[in-house]
Image: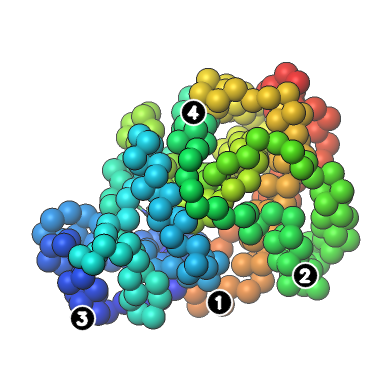
């Protein structure tokens, strides 16, 4: 459960007074997500999501995230919208945290996605990339090469507690990625965390994307590599090429990849596997024992990283170079 900051009814009612959102009927903490504190509110007008922004979210980045949701929705992408307060601001404060009220998106995330869902996710990801064009704010990816080094510096001394030999293995991987990371690929606004829990479906139909709090400017195809990591591996650690092919085909049906993007997929997939390994490792080692959050297993991403290290060409993901 991700509730790091608790709220009380009196403060919440005062917070709601700043919006034209109706009277509070009920609220409860949401037992999902790991980054922010989320609450489901019912008011006399509508169900709403209240988000209190926590640890990894920089307050200065919130205009980027909240503005992006409006930009994407204006261009036809289905995603939640931050509600404006009566004074027009999209952001307020509650329990000492920056806070926003977000519209409720219907649907639920899939616990067992199939290839047909991966195809829809590929299409939606490409549609997001296209819709993101023209968004005037910029946010460099804080979790790319430099950010990985910073995270690693904070975790490496204890990494071997998680698996013996990690300190050397991950140090070598970081050096490899720093040397081979691409520098010139089509770039734009990426979601950067499009995991199954951030994509809602109604039946087999994709109803929308949520959780834009890692969104940033980076290589577009890097986002696809995150999608392959998050959706196309089975519980036993095996890559499912049928799902991978479906996601890539779905993506290309909206935004075809260039040869350079296709060739970069193995290295980018290594990088994105390492990125999720590192945040999970850091959280594994630092989340306080009593926190109301389900910690995610870093070793799942170590296995994925080792898979990508052996990939010789993008054909192994279901793509012809
Ligand atoms: N706009 C929304 N509409 C409906 N449910 C939402 C919405 N935003 C968040 N949720 C619920 O809250 C959970 C956690 O949200 P998420 O944004 O993934 O959290 P975090 O910021 O911690 O990653 C989601 O899995 C979903 O159940
Ligand atoms: N997707 C990340 C964790 C952060 O995403 P959330 O949507 O679960 O808060 C991971 O799996 O490591």
Residue annotated with mark 4: 123
Disc nearest the viewer among 1 and 2: 2
Please, what secondary structure does the residue beneath circle 4 have?
helix
Q: Which mark is residue 10?
A: 3
Residue 45 point in image, percent of width and height:
13, 56
Label 1 CB sits under 8 Å from any ligand 1 atom: no
Q: CA distance from mark 2 to mark 4?
A: 37 Å
Q: Are marks 4 and 1 in contact (CB under 8 Å)?
A: no
> Would you name the residue on which mark 1 appears?
289
Q: CA distance from mark 1 to mark 2?
A: 22 Å
Gap between marks 3 and 2 measured at Cα: 42 Å
Task: Check if mark 4's residue and mark 3's residue have beta carbons within 8 Å.
Answer: no
Front disc: 3 or 1: 3
Q: Is residue 234 visible?
A: no
Specify the label residue 208 is tagged with.
none
The residue positioned 49% from the left and 28% from the top of the image is 123
Q: Is residue 232 left or right of residue 110?
A: right
Q: Quadrant of the C terminus?
A: top right
């Amino acid at each position: 459960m991700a509730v790091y900051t608790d709220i009380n009814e009196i403060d919440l009612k005062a917070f709601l007074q700043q919006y034209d959102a109706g009277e509070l009927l009920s609220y409860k903490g949401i037992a999902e997500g790991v980054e922010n504190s989320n609450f489901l509110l019912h008011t006399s007008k509508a169900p709403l999501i209240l988000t209190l922004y926590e640890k990894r979210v920089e307050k200065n980045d919130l205009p980027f995230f909240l503005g992006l949701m409006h930009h994407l929705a204006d261009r036809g992408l289905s995603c939640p919208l931050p509600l404006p307060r009566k004074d027009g601001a999209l952001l307020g404060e509650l329990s000492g945290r920056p806070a926003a009220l977000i519209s409720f998106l219907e649907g639920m995330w899939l616990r067992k996605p199939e290839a047909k869902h991966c195809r829809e996710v590929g299409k939606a990801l490409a549609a997001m990339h296209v819709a993101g064009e023209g968004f005037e704010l910029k946010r460099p990816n804080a979790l790319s090469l430099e950010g990985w080094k910073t995270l690693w510096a904070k975790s490496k001394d204890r990494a071997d507690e998680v698996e013996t030999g990690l300190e050397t293995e991950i140090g070598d991987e970081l050096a490899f990625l720093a040397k081979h990371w691409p520098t010139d690929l089509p770039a734009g606004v990426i979601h950067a965390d499009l995991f199954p829990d951030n994509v809602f479906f109604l039946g087999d139909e994709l109803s929308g994307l949520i959780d834009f709090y890692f969104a940033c400017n980076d290589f577009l195809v890097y986002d696809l590599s995150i999608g392959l990591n998050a959706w196309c591996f089975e519980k036993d650690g095996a890559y499912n090429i049928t799902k991978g092919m479906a996601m890539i085909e779905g993506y290309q049906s909206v935004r075809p990849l260039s040869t350079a993007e296709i060739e970069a997929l193995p290295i980018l997939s290594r990088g994105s596997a390492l990125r999720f390994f590192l945040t999970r490792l850091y959280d594994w080692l630092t989340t306080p024992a009593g926190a109301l959050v389900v910690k995610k297993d870093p070793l799942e991403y170590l296995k994925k990283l080792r898979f990508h290290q052996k990939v010789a060409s993008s054909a192994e993901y279901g793509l012809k170079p």
